[in-house]
Amino acid sequence: MRAMTLRTRFAPSPTGHLHVGNARTALFSALLAAQADGEFILRIEDTDAERSRAEFETMLLADLAWLGLHWQEGPDLGGPHAPYRQSERSRIYRTYIDKLAGQGRTYPCFCTPGELALARKIQLAAGRPPRYAGTCARLTNAEIETRLAQGLKPALRFRVPDQGATEFDDLIRGAQRFAHKDIGDFVIRRADGSPAFFFSNALDDALMGVTQVLRGEDHLANTPRQLLILEALGLHAPRYGHLPLVLGAGSAPLSKREGGGSLQELRSAGILPEALVNYLARLGHVYAREDFLSLAELVRDFNVAHIGHAPAHFDHAQLEHWQREAIKHADSGRLWNWLAEMPKLAALVPAEQRADFIETVRGNLVRPAEARVWADIIFGERPELSDASRTAICSAGPAFFDAAIRALPEARTGFAGFANAVSAATGARGRKLFMPLRAALTGLEHGPEMERIWPLLTAARVKARLQHAAVLCK
């Protein structure tokens, strides 16, 4: 008998920018599927017509592709379980809602939002968990018809059994048990006719053959409701695993509504996707190796058993660490494509020197804008001097740079040969030798190795910069 294919999914709502918490969920789901040679599905949950936007869906797909994630079915690819937008699955939802109604598992609810809010407030004040009180559960057919004749639009609630409990084995948190008396009857169709999350999300997972669902722990209380729905419909339920939340500044949950930690912001800031993926893979999940890993290595070593229960904190300093690691491990062509997004960079760096330029500045980069700075320094006109560089130049004095100009013929052996010749002529050693030369040639007191910068500087540029330093403090 052929083993069932492991199928995971990511099901975002297109109501804002994708933030790192949801991106981590997508990544974990994709890693879990890839490790088992399974399938990863993308589904768009856009039943909230008021807040869903086509442009957000477009950005969601672009962000996920930028991360390097690949799905086998989705709104852009199609697949055997299409459509993959919930807004296009209304007929499917009606069919299964009618099936539940035919079983007597639903009833119309005419309670207003204000009435529900008041009931919730009273329950909380009494120290009871808020749950629907069953106000409309015992309406007679005549009472229902009267309300409908008055033009009232009811929601539809699912009847939860009075007795017993729903139990399941969470992939991350282990055995879970929810008493039915604490759940309360819940809405599966809103008053406007649209399906509620509890219903459409669970139904789609079952109909699309999803076997494992990874999602945030804020959905843990939804799981017994969804298992009850699928049991009533006779559909196979996936195994659920609830991830610890990703918290931002002040230990508040990251939110796409506030724009905190959105992928759009990180992309605009020049973060490499390889850096973000390496960081997200370790947010709440432990890898044995602490060094930079390729996506294939992240897949190979991913283990649901290594996901913790405590909230994970998104730390920009840690992201910067992985950014440096990603830059360190990227090949020159990959880095050039990343850097070339900077305006005018391609025009500044000669094509034949791009690879050398990348290797020269690689260790001094965190963002693409820094490459533009070094391109200006190396290939542009005379660099602007920092205050520290001006001080270093003036401390060395004009005679030092006159001697450096006379030593230029020795530059054929590289910067080291040139510096040795200057040292022999001036007696300068160590910092008193190298700091004035670096300051005059780059305008800064730190940066890439001068031995690497030197071949990229033309002889004319070197001479002009030394001449400027010689007259700067006269």
Image (cartoon, grey):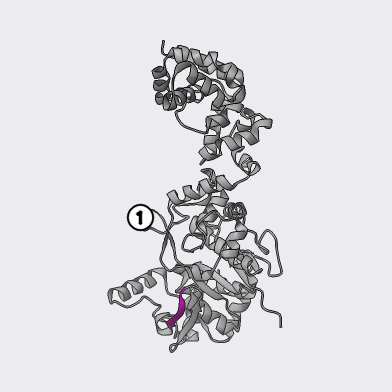
- Camera sees residue 47: no
Placement of 370 over or under 206, stated as above or below: above
- Residue drawn at the location 44% of the way across and 27% of the way down: 430
Residue situated in front as seen by the camera: 211 or 37: 37
- Residue drawn at the location 52% of the way across and 18% of the way down: 465
Is 57 in the magenta? Answer: no
- Residue drawn at the location 40% of the way across and 25% of the way down: 388
Q: Quadrant of the N terminus?
A: bottom right
**Location of residue 243 in the rendering, given as x and y in whole percent from the top left corner:** 48, 67
Looking at the rendered structure, the kind of residue marked 1 is: Gly
Residue situated in front as seen by the camera: 194 or 473: 473
Residue situated in front as seen by the camera: 317 or 84: 317
> On the picture, is 124 further left or further right than 174?
left
Placement of 90 over or under 254, stated as above or below: below
**Location of residue 452 in the rendering, given as x and y in whole percent from the top left corner:** 57, 32
Q: Secondary structure at mark 1?
A: helix
Name of the residue lying farthest toward the bottom: 163
Q: Which residues are magenta?
A: 173-178
Quadrant of res 343: top right
> On the picture, is 204 further left or further right than 285?
right
Name the residue carrying label 1: 250
- Residue drawn at the location 56% of the way across and 21% of the way down: 381
Placement of 389 over or under 190, stated as above or below: above
Q: Residues within 10 Å of mark 1 (few under 14, many from 20)?
A: few
- Camera sees residue 287: yes
Is 177 in the magenta? Answer: yes
Placement of 15 over or under 409, stated as above or below: below
